[in-house]
Image (cartoon, grey):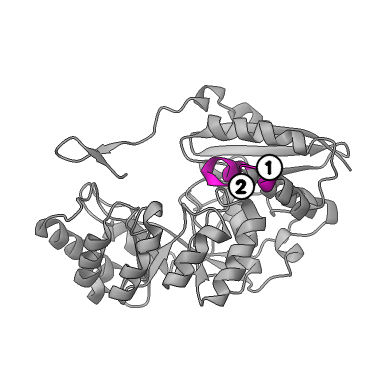
Amino acid sequence: MRITTVETFVLGERQLLVRIGTDEGLAGWGDATLEHRPGTVAAAVRELSGQLLGADPTPVTAHWQMLSRGGFYRGGPVLSSAVAGLDQALWDLRGRYLGAPVHVLLGGPCRDRVRLYTHTWGAPGHTGGPARARELVAAGYTLVKTAVAGPVGFLDSPAMTARFVADLEALRAAVGAAADFGIDLHGRVSVHHARRLADAVAHTAPAFFEEPLRPEHSRLIGRLVAGTGVPIATGERLYSREEFLPVFEAGIAIAQPDLSHAGGITEVFRIATMAESFDVQVAPHCPIGPVALAACVQLDLAVPNFYAQEHVIDLTSPGSPDLAILRNPEVLVPTAGHLDRPTGPGLGIEIDEDAVRAAHRPDLLIPTERPTWRHPDGSFAEW
């Protein structure tokens, strides 16, 4: 079997699919999305495809080595996302060739189902939506998440802190004591203000503070870990084992690598293995589409130290528009906030190729929706 085609399909600014085709008719799919940069990553996939065309697709790790390290310059969000999409597609193809799910090829399932969590959103200016949180818990979710309302100043006002506390108290009342909620600080907060916020809301028992600092300040995260009992999670903008090692050593509780950014299944499996040595659990970041989610689920099943799986797409029914590119959408519809272990080959999903080709949006290679925020004085604010 030889690789004959490598194609990319832009379905939105937050969904860039990769298809690897072969001379035997088998194809594998992956998601190389780097949010709001589909054209940049599509170009990187096109450049890397020259290393795959004509090759046997089955030695996935060997391909990962060449794709990640063969160009001398390596790493970063663009190249790592391109490699991630190709890596997912290669694993999908390998699984289809061998007639086995990816998690079986990674050593077999460690669990029968995957715990999910999703967002409660919230009214403008507020952290979290209590009404949606109650609905999710009633549907069986044991973990929900929301993001801090922003922008957030370097040392924001007492009014901001008071609003944050009131919002989290309302969220705790909504989910009760039997469920958890996490708070995404989205890299909007300084280490000093993050400690202030953690102290102020510790009584609400958040499951975690996510990405409290910008990734370039990862070396400082140990100060926050040491100064609060609130568990710290991070990693959606870290792209390799080497970038995760300092935050593991700093004592984070939960690692959140993104399988569409951090080199795909191959690298994130290694990140998860390293995390286990530091008593860190893994909750893969996944704010994009069903192919990325399916890849995450395969990893979630295979690693012992899995915590929970994020999703943002609508999984409420097989008829969800977010699942329209799948021929078997039912495999991603949860029961009581959990996904049952998929048994199909590869990523466990069947792509409707005609639907993908029809949905391709080459005009989105130049993005238009990238969000920007400003502080009251007009200066740049972290989104």
Asked whether residue 15 is drawn in magenta, I would say no
Query: In this rendering, does residue 192 appear at all?
Result: yes
- Location of residue 335 with respect to 58 vertically, above or below: below
| 73 in the magenta segment | yes
Residue 202, image x, y percentages:
25, 74
For label 1, the crowd category at 10 Å Cα-Cα, with few meaning under 14, some 14 to 19 and many 20 or more, is: many
Assign the C terminus to one quadrant of the image: top left
Picture residue at 63% right of the left edge, 63% below the top: 269
Viewer-nearest residue: 287 or 76 = 76
Camera sees residue 209 = no
User: SS for tag 2?
Assistant: helix
From the viewer's perspective, is residue 33 above or below residue 366? below
**Of the numbered discs in the image, which one, if any, rests on residue 291?**
2
For the point 80% across and 35% down, the residue is 53
Which residue is more in the foreground, 368 or 379?
379
Image quadrant in which the N terminus is located: top right
Residue position for label 1:
351
Whether residues under marks 2 and 1 lie with C-beta atoms below 8 angstroms apart, the answer is yes
Front residue of 222 and 174: 222
**Which amino acid, by three-letter code, is at mark 2?**
Val
N-terminal-most mark, 2 or 1: 2
* Mark 2 crowd level (few <14, some 14–19, many ≥20, 10 Å Cα): many
The residue located at (14%, 37%) in the rendering is 377
| Residue 19 place in picture, x, y as percent | 70, 38
The kind of secondary structure the magenta stretch mainly shows is helix
Q: Decide if residue 211 is on the left or right side of residue 205.
A: right
Q: Which residues are magenta?
A: 68-82
Gap in angstroms between the C-alphas marked 2 and 1: 9 Å
